[in-house]
Image (tube, rainbow, N blue to C red):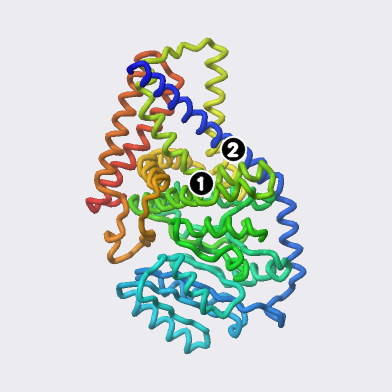
Amino acid sequence: MGALLSDLAVFLYFGAAAALMLYGLNCYVMIFLFNRGRTGAADARRRILDAAGDIELREDLPVVTTQIAVYNEVNVAERAIRAACRMRYPRDRHEIQVLDDSTDETCAIVDRTADLLRAEGHDVRVLRRKERTGFKAGALAAGLDVAKGSLAAVFDADFVPSEEYLLRTVPFFLADDRLALVQARWGHLNRTRSLLTRAQSIGIDGHFMVEQAARNWNGLYMNFNGTAGIWRRTAIADGGGWAWDTLTEDMDLSYRVQFAGWRTLFLPDLVVPAEIPEDVDAFKGQQFRWAKGSIQTAVKLLPRLVRQPVSLFKKLQAFFHMTHYLVHPMMLLMAILALPVLQVLNMNFGPLIFGAVACALLLSMTAPSALYLVSQRAAYRDWPRRVLFMPFLVVLGVGIAISNTRAVVEALAGRESPFIRTPKRGDREIKRYRTSLPGLAFAEILMGGYCMLSLQVYLDAGKYLIGPFLAVYAMGFLFIGILTIVQRLGWEG
């Protein structure tokens, strides 16, 4: 029995290492695709906008409904509604829907703001439901049922679109009647607030600037990111409409619409700024929702993906996309099994094998950082200063492995959970929306201590290949666990 468990531990450890290597190496594929399609895509976008001319003077403009999903957003609701009304577009063809499911004083703020803006000539409608069925997805679906527009722009309450947003997105729908979605890039209103927000901004930029662009420019499946995008209403209907059987209704609908033959477009040069979670509990809650929702979407849609008449490469990239959060269970598994594997396996490699293994590990483990570096260079002139915070992002990504593993397990087990929105800065009742369990922080600290013990045992045994990774694991778990407890006690993070 002992030998069987030892063999199982070794198998799981190296299986997890191989899986992480594949996901890591795919980052280089994304970088290659990004660089390959960058110039051609930019030229194509420019030609369409130039051909559209001054669209404010055109008589064939479609009616646009801007939907703002609101739930207890005391300090950001008014800003979001006013930003939507400032977007340049003929007023008689622009409807603003405030989908307000709030249960606090947000309702009064929304009503007062809507009244003021209607008096200024804006078409602002406030929609409230008796029950919060389907959470955000249900609100969007209910709003769409009574919307005037053939296009629907969707914004979360903490996003602040520019005045030119509609002028820079609607022309693409006029040029392509099979275009379902135009997605803008997320910006960051509070990037410099803390190390936590700086690190998150780099991770978000990596996803948008490189991954979204690489997928879109090379004919791969890409996803709507839940906000800062504009949809063709008929495409939503053709894809089956908004559904709320996953926590990532945005990814779910995106794939279903593309399975139905519709196209999508990503605009990296159109940036819509928003807030980044400043509280580590809020950050973990957001990541939990994304992790669980994406795996739920994978379970739901991978059988349909297999049947799609597309290339194997396109299917493979869709698989990597939907299952990306599996890297966290793999990291946690490796952290747990590192010590047992050392006890049962003699890993005395010769120089050549040691060098080959070390290079493979180095290439795969540094691949995400390479992707983040490319994104910062492509997006910002001051990128050398921004990339100084990349090591902190690595530590952060490891530290949430326990929380995200729980999310993945719940998704695979079919366990349901409500959509919990990410608290925004200044929320008066922010503690209502804590999403991580208190015990989780202590588990993270214990895991960090265990990784430190494993590191010491490896170093004492003269095994240095795994040492750097165990050190990062220890720092990540300890940092996230301690920061969670400190912020729960009311200290500044």
Q: CA distance from mark 2 to mark 1?
A: 24 Å
Hey, what amino acid is under mark 1? Arg
Against 227, is 15 above or below?
above
Residue located at (58% from left, 34% from top):
25
Q: Is residue 188 visible?
A: yes
Comparing 200 with 3, the one in front is: 3
Hey, what amino acid is under mark 2? Asn
Q: Quadrant of residue 65?
A: bottom right
Q: Quadrant of residue 63?
A: bottom right
What secondary structure is found at the residue carrying circle 2?
A: helix
Q: Give the number of the disc on residue 457.
A: none
Residue located at (29% from left, 66% from top):
428
Measuring from the top left, give residue 50's x and y in whole percent: 75, 67
Measuring from the top left, give residue 362's x and y in whole percent: 53, 27
Residue 273 appears left or right of 131: right
Which residue is identified by label 2? Answer: 26
Measuring from the top left, give residue 303's x and y in whole percent: 56, 47
Measuring from the top left, give residue 377's x and y in whole percent: 60, 46
Which residue is identified by label 1? Answer: 386
